[in-house]
Image (cartoon, grey):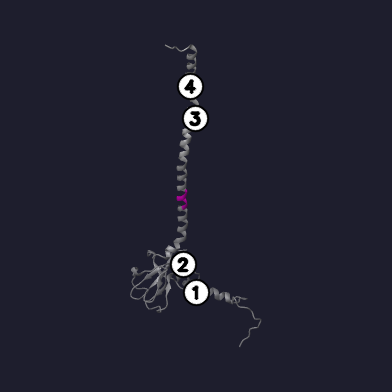
Amino acid sequence: MATSSPMQSQVYAQTQETEPLIDAPESHIRALSEPVVRCWRRWPRVFLTLGAFLYVSVLVVWASSNSDKTSDDARLSAVQPESRVPVRPLPSGEAAPRRLQCVAWRATGRCRPNGPREPQNDKKCSDVIVNGMSGFCEVEDVDTGERFQVMQRHCTSLKDHVRFRCSDAPSFVSYHFDGHEAVQKALSPGFSLPHVTDNGLTPRDG
């Protein structure tokens, strides 16, 4: 039987001792690389989450900014409920104009503006009021919160071709103030009509 020589036994023993020294660095590298790979795999999820959060934030900001812009349009396009605050006719002869905004057209019965209320026939501020409808435009003082009746109409107050909207009520109410201001301006020294050129002639009577 062949026997191994002492030299071969010594070489084999050295080989067995050196094998763990060769495998050790590879095992450490593998142990360090696995967490790195797992970390890189998580990044797409992180980016996706951040993107979704930013998208939702932009939508919230956009919606809040648009809500302020459309609040006035919504007020004009919807019939506002009646307030518990008493609504009385706007006092005449006031010295200063009020800042008014339209609330709604309030319909009344018996062909009179002071007739019984008919809430089912109320109109939005943007709706057209025509002949055959009785009621009044309800407006609110922006500064005091008071509500008034303006532009009261009988069912026969308007001619067939005449129409109006309650959204015009604030301008209608302040018309006499604007007219008075225009008259005072015309009476001031040096006033001249716009877009009228001076022809150099001296005005004379007759």
Residue depth check, mark 3 versus mark 2: number of the one nearer the observer: 3
| Residue type beneath disc 2 | Leu
Q: What residue sits right under mark 1 in the picture?
A: 176
Report, in whole angstroms, how far the alpha carbon at label 1 lies from the one at label 4: 108 Å
Badge 3 element? helix
Q: In the rendered structure, find residue 100 and report the number of the disc placed on it.
A: 2
Residue depth check, mark 1 versus mark 4: number of the one nearer the observer: 4
Q: In the rendered structure, find residue 19 and report the number of the disc placed on it.
A: 4
Picture residue at 47% right of the left edge, 60% below the top: 69
Q: Are marks 4 and 3 in contact (CB under 8 Å)?
A: no
In percent of width and height, residue 72 lies at: 45, 63
**Quadrant, the N terminus:** top left
Report, in whole angstroms, how far the alpha carbon at label 4 lies from the one at label 3: 17 Å
Q: What residue sits right under mark 3 in the picture?
A: 29
Q: First in sequence: mark 2 or mark 4?
A: 4
**Name of the residue lying farthest toward the front:** 1
Q: Judge by depth and name the residue closer to the eye, 205 or 91.
A: 205
Badge 1 element? helix
Q: Residues within 10 Å of mark 1 (few under 14, many from 20)?
A: few
Residue depth check, mark 4 versus mark 3: number of the one nearer the observer: 4
| Residue type beneath disc 1 | His
Q: First in sequence: mark 3 or mark 1?
A: 3
Picture residue at 52% right of the left edge, 73% below the top: 178
